[in-house]
Image (tube, grey):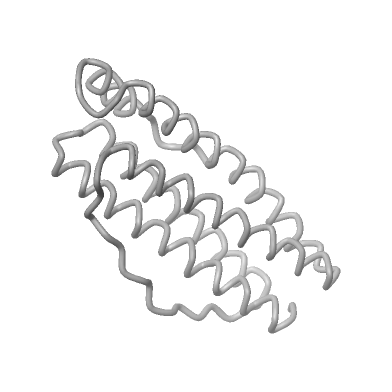
Amino acid sequence: MFSQKLQDAINAQINAEFHSAYIYLGMSAYLEDMNMPGFAHWMRLQYEEETMHALKLYDFMHERGGHVVLEPIGAATSEYASVLAVFEHTLAHEKKVTSLINALYEMAVAENDYPTQVLMQWYISEQVEEEKNASDAVAQLQWVGDFGPGMLMLDREMGSRQPEAE
């Protein structure tokens, strides 16, 4: 068993991960509406990955004898100014998630909760990858501009993304 304070924080992170999934599903919907199937596919995989992140925490809580509390998930938009705006929002969101993960790790350290520290190290590594992927997409989109053959090629490249193996 672990502290109620840490359980509450993990429950909040479960909610944050499901909210992230919902945000990415909204982005995928926008990109589908923009006839950008490759970008939409990329965001759909982000949705699936964030759902997996939430379930990893969900399972961890049960393995440790904790109590999962599922709160309402915040609304997500499917309206953006451009493909670039979607990925700029993605990068900002991933930076926010990184700060939540870091705070959870710091709490686990303060409470000498070693199992949670180990789990959070996995999430910390995952966030490095998440921020890099979003940052790379922003840079590429800035380079190709809003329209033209570069955007079409980048859409096809994003569509080749494969689901992440656990």
Image-based side of 143 in relation to 100, left or right: left
Does residue 2 sit above or below 118 in this rendering? below
**Residue 57 location (% of width, % of height):** 57, 63
Horizontal and vertical percent for residue 35? 14, 35
Task: Identify the image quadrant of the N terminus.
Answer: bottom right
Residue 162's quadrant in the figure? top left
Residue at figure coordinates x 35%, y 57% from the top left:
23
Identified at 47% across, 45% down, the residue is: 91
Residue 148 in picture, x, y percent from top left: 20, 19
Residue at position x 69%, y 84% from top? 4
On screen, residue 158 above or below 64: above
Note whether 150 is above or below 129 in the view shown: above
Pick the residue in front: 8 or 60. Answer: 8
Residue at (38% x, 22% y) in the render: 143
- Foreground pick, 133 / 141: 141
Give the camera-side residue of 110 and 63: 110
Apparent side of residue 77 relative to residue 164 in the rendered image (left or right) = left
Q: Which of 50 and 146 is in front in this view?
A: 146
